[in-house]
Image (cartoon, rainbow, N blue to C red):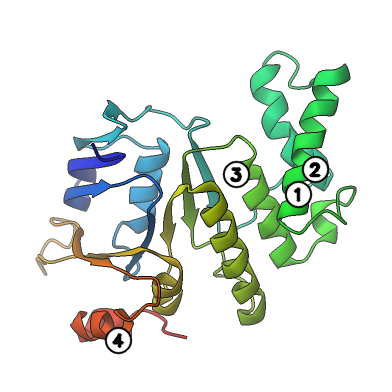
Amino acid sequence: MSFITVKNVWQQYVDQVVLEGLNLTVNEGEFCTLVGASGCGKSTFLRLLLGQERASRGEILLDGQPLAAEPDASRGVVFQRYSVFPHLSVLDNVALGLELPRSRLLGRLFGSAKKEAREQASVLLHKVGLGHSLDKYPAQLSGGMQQRLAIAQALIMKPRVLLLDEPFGALDPGIRKDMHALLLELWRETRLTVFMVTHDLSEGFSLGTRLLVFDKVRLDPHAPGRYGARITYDIPLNSDRRTHSTAVDALPVQLAGSLRTA
């Protein structure tokens, strides 16, 4: 049985169809990179996987069961814009993810429980390269360090699925390369199932084990919202990326041209 199954999923807002007829099966531990022109529903698909939205039609199954209709600990998420708490230290930003579920009334733990949560957070922060910044505040961190913090926040609850919405798009190329190495290291260690949206084809090929291309195959010039995007290409990627050039050549020129290939 596949880990995640997407069955004939459509997403529509009033008269605007964003996604149509999505069908997909994903095994646990796969790293899926999602590419496509802007407005093709990639981020919408992530929100469906997260549980922020419910599909207009169709269903999404996780381990054979309908996906929970709201975000939960099984799914972690990292956005392009830093989703950290500016008034909390680096350590408290991550420890909070353990405290809130265990103390819903006060939102805080005390005594040995709090100490344990902070120790777990510290171990993870050292792993993502922030062990020297536990007492700093987000405003004192660089963009790359803030994204390391956001990744630690997403992983502290030990999710089974990690959703990344252009997490490195705002970073300089050198910092982005370091973040790629960190992400791959964490993925190999945890064997999370990852879905990552990117506009950079090179990033999609270098990180993923599978490249999913979203595109609109039907267009109506008189009713732009009538049709939505589908997964038009599902390209398996091997470890040495020998498929890279062949796969790029297979993509439509207008689609490949709309994506960065830096």
Say what amino acid the circle numbered 2 marks. Answer: Ser
Please provide percent x and percent y for residue 261: 41, 84
Label disc, if present, on residue 125 of the rendered structure: 1
Q: Is residue 163 left or right of residue 129?
A: left
Q: Tag 4, which secondary structure?
A: helix
Looking at the image, tell me whether mark 4 or mark 3 is earlier in sequence order. Answer: 3
Q: Gap between marks 4 and 1, in whole Å?
A: 37 Å
Label disc, if present, on residue 154 of the rendered structure: 3
Please provide percent x and percent y for residue 61: 27, 33
Please provide percent x and percent y for residue 102: 68, 18
The image quarter in which residue 5 lies: top left
Q: Is residue 13 visible?
A: no
Contact (Cβ within 8 Å) of mark 2 with mark 1 = yes
Looking at the image, tell me whether mark 4 or mark 1 is earlier in sequence order. Answer: 1
Contact (Cβ within 8 Å) of mark 4 with mark 3 = no
In the figure, 75 relative to 229: above or below?
Answer: above
Label disc, if present, on residue 226 of the rendered structure: none
